[in-house]
Image (cartoon, grey):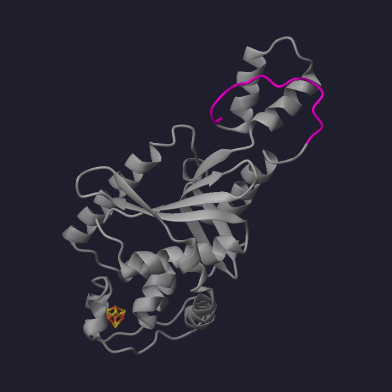
Amino acid sequence: MAHILSKSKYIRGLQCDRALWLDVHNPRLARYTAEQMRRFDRGRDFEYAFKSTFPHGIDISAELKRNVDAYPARTAELLDRIHTPSPLRGTPPNLGGELKSVAVVDEHYLGSSPKLGEGDRREAVVEECETITLFEAGFLYDDVLVLADVVHKRPDGSLDIYEVKSGTALSETYRRDAALQHYVISHCRKINTFSIVYANPDGGFIKEELSAALQEQHEEIEKNIAAMKAIALATNEPDTPTGAHCLEPYGCPYQTHCQSGVRQLALF
Ligand code: SF4
C-alpha cells in the first residue's frame, strides 16, 4: 500500500508545512549545499559502520532498492516466516549464531546434518531461526512509512530497534525522529527496546535506550500526522513566508524556490 508520509517528510513538516508540501509534490526543487551532501555521506558511513557489527543482518534495501512501498510486506514476511511455530520431529542441530535468511539457513542445515529426514530439516530450520536482524526494515501505519536502520527480532518475537545518528550528542531532532519511528513500529510489532546510536567523540558508538520517553510522545505524533496528511494532500502549495524557521533545525533546501516568489500546483 502506498504511503503518504515518511520519516523525512514528517521531520520536514515539523519545520515548515510548505517544505513538506514541496517534498511530496516537487522534490526536484530542492537544492542541497556541498556541506549538506558531505554530512549525508558522513552519516551513511557511520550507519554502515554500526550495521557491520551485525554480520548476519539482511539488508532489505539491497533486495527492493527504491520500491519502498514493498518494504513492509517483505519485512513482515521475514519476521513472521521465521517465527511460525511448527511441531519438531527431529532433534535440531546447534548451528550456532544468527542465520542469514531462511533460504541460506536451509542450505546451511542440509550441508551440516545429513542424517535427518526432509521434514526434520524444514522444522529444525524454523527452530533455529528464532532471531533475525534486518537492515532498513519497513513498517507502515496510519499512511506513514518508516524504515528502521537496524531491527533485531528476539526469540520471544519482540524487537530491539537501533536508530543510527552520526552526531556526537543526542539532539531534540534525533528524539523527534525516533519518536515517529517508535509510534509507527509499536502499532505493528511489540518493541522490547528502542535505542538511538550516536558517535562517541573518543571513537565507537553510544547507545541510549529511550522507549519510555518516546512512548510519551505518541499522542502529539498522532495529531501531527493528521495535520501533515492534510497538508500533503492539499492541491495548492502553502504560501508560508520565509523566515528564521528556514534555517533551523536544518537549512531548508527550498530556499531558492521560495525566494523566487513562484508557487506550485499539485499534480495528482
Ligand atoms: S524556504 Fe522556508 S518557507 Fe520555504 S519551504 Fe523552506 S522553510 Fe518553508
Instruction: Give the main secondary structure of the magenta stretch.
Output: loop
Magenta region includes residue 95: yes
Q: Of residues 202 and 111, which is closer to you in this image?
A: 202
Q: Residue at x 30, y 66 (%)?
A: 171
Q: Residue at x 37, y 72 (%)?
A: 12
- Residue occupying the far top of the picture: 115
- Give x and y (percent) for residue 91: 75, 20
Whether 88 is drawn above or below 117: the answer is below
Does residue 263 appear to the left or right of 120 in the view shown? left
**Quadrant position of the N terminus in the picture:** bottom right
Range of residues picked out in magenta? 86-99
Magenta region includes residue 216: no
Whether 18 is drawn above or below 109: the answer is below
- Give x and y (percent) for residue 89: 82, 23
Q: Of residues 115 and 40, which is closer to you in this image?
A: 115
Whether 157 is drawn above or below 250: the answer is above
